Amino acid sequence: MLREQKKPDSTLTYLNGRHPVLQLYTLLSTFLFLLCLPLILAVSLLKKKYRGKNLQRLGLTLSRPLQTIIKSPAKKDGPVIWIHALSVGEVTSALPLIRGLRRQYPDSTLFFSTTTRTGQATAKQLAKDLVDAIFFSPFDTFFSVRSFIHLLEPSLFILVETDFWPCWLMQLKKNKIPCLLVNGRFSKKSITNYQRFRFLFRPMFACFSLLSLQTKQDAKNLQCLGLPEEKIIPLGNLKFDATLASDAHYTKNNYANTITRADFGLEKNRPLLICGSTHRGEEEIILGAWKTIKKNQPDLYLLLAPRNIERTEEIAKIAKSYGLQTTRRSVRNAVSTDILLLDSLGELAACYGLADIALIGGSLVEAGGHNPLEAAIVGIPILFGPHMEDFSEISRDLVAAGGALVVTDSDAITVGITELLNAPDQAKKMGHAAKMLVQNNQGVVQSHLDIIDHLLNPHIIHEKG
């Protein structure tokens, strides 16, 4: 049964969401935006790269392609659900929920917005058959947000993980549109930053109808802002439900349906180490370890997938400084080397299904780490550095289950990978432990669907056995 709603905190409750601090923010942000508008329009018109994105974010070019969808008789009886994801990571987190929404509400209209270009490209690649339209999000100004809301007329707004904008959330609340945060994560560092501007962020987060968080620790951290306890629910990580049955991208046995070793020019029986979502400063550590490992493991392949694919040329130069040659995924018929740079979008999850060992990027430097579940799902052993703050509970659980190792530097990486390559039974055992942790935590999507059903139908009493 969903939690009984307590009487709202009077300090957070204002008629139609008109909180004075949020209103002041909206006024100031809109004023500053109008001052900058001539420059934004000039850049948009002069540079094709920004033209379509900025004009769409202003709400000027969104209506024409959406009118047919909005007026479609086939969709008129279902709810209109607007899902927003900041970039690539948030888009992939949203996919299991979007699949669940499409199954539960087949007659719904699903709109999917992103903020970044890479997020947009990933959404179009992975979600185009699941949603009705994909577009860029509005600027956080009164006129842009109002234009989007009036055009889309959503029954529900779902924000994935992050990208909080006060004006946007206030306007949704003002228009009595339920707002749900899913897969939220709040580290102690981020909460400290929010607390510095508590006068703004507390009422902003209060605009949400419910905040679904990945872990109990995330919930505990968020409660430090003084939000009503009944609004905060730790439902788990949606990526736990990127199941083998529902997504070939996450299936080691079925990865041939999406991508194969032959696509990369990799021999079938040679071991492959994938280092996913690496950040600046990590490649030197990884390449140093790889050169040492290769002395005793000459067949080892290395696939480097930078978090920002625009760094591909930079990484190729770093490898060259180590006397190493690289091949890029985007270069067709290139001469095969033992180091492959993944400079494409949306393929990392499928690539984990080809690998023997995974090293999670963003963890060897102070970048907070990245989600290790894409590797855990396919049942391979996982290594990550000491900086997994953004996924602290998941990484801790993986280590406790025996599915992951913490490596602190190049020497530790060398030892860890060498031992796994020399002990295939131990590597298999670690991979199985990682996979079982995922399977034992599935059901997150259904928990979210139950809450969504309640938000869409608040007059219906929901009971769970």
Image (tube, rainbow, N blue to C red):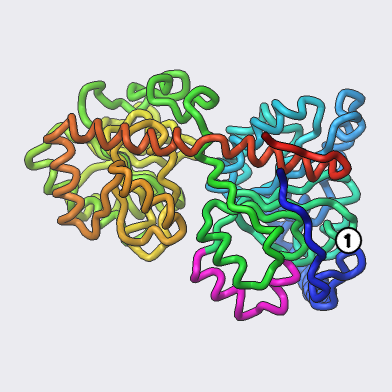
Q: Determine which residue is flagged by label 1.
A: 174
In front of the other: 137 or 420: 420
Task: Tell me the quarter of the picture where residue 70 sits.
Answer: top right
Question: In which quadrant will I find the N terminus?
Answer: top right
235 vs 211: above or below: above
Task: Tell me the quarter of the picture where residue 74 sits.
Answer: top right
State left or right for residue 24 relative to residue 389.
right
In front of the other: 378 or 133: 378
**Residue 27 coordinates in the image, percent (x, y):** 84, 75
Callout count: 1
Q: Give the main secondary structure of the magenta stretch.
A: helix
444 vs 370: above or below: above
Within-10-Å neighbours for mark 1: few <14, some 14–19, many 20+: some
Residue type highlighted by circle 1: Lys
Look at 62% across and 67% down and name the residue there.
223
Q: Is residue 403 visible?
A: yes
State left or right for residue 445 relative to residue 397.
right
Question: In which quadrant will I find the C terminus?
Answer: top right
Look at 66% across and 31% down and name the residue there.
100
Quick one: which residue is furthest to the left in this view? 296
408 vs 414: above or below: below
**Residue 177 coordinates in the image, percent (x, y):** 85, 51
For label 1, the SS is helix
Look at 36% across and 61% down and name the residue there.
387
Judge whether residue 460 is colored magenta: no
Judge whether residue 197 is colored magenta: yes
447 vs 68: above or below: below
In front of the other: 307 or 184: 184
**Residue 388 coordinates in the image, percent (x, y):** 39, 58
Span colored in magenta = 187-204
Q: Is residue 168 visible?
A: no
Look at 80% across and 77% down and name the residue there.
21
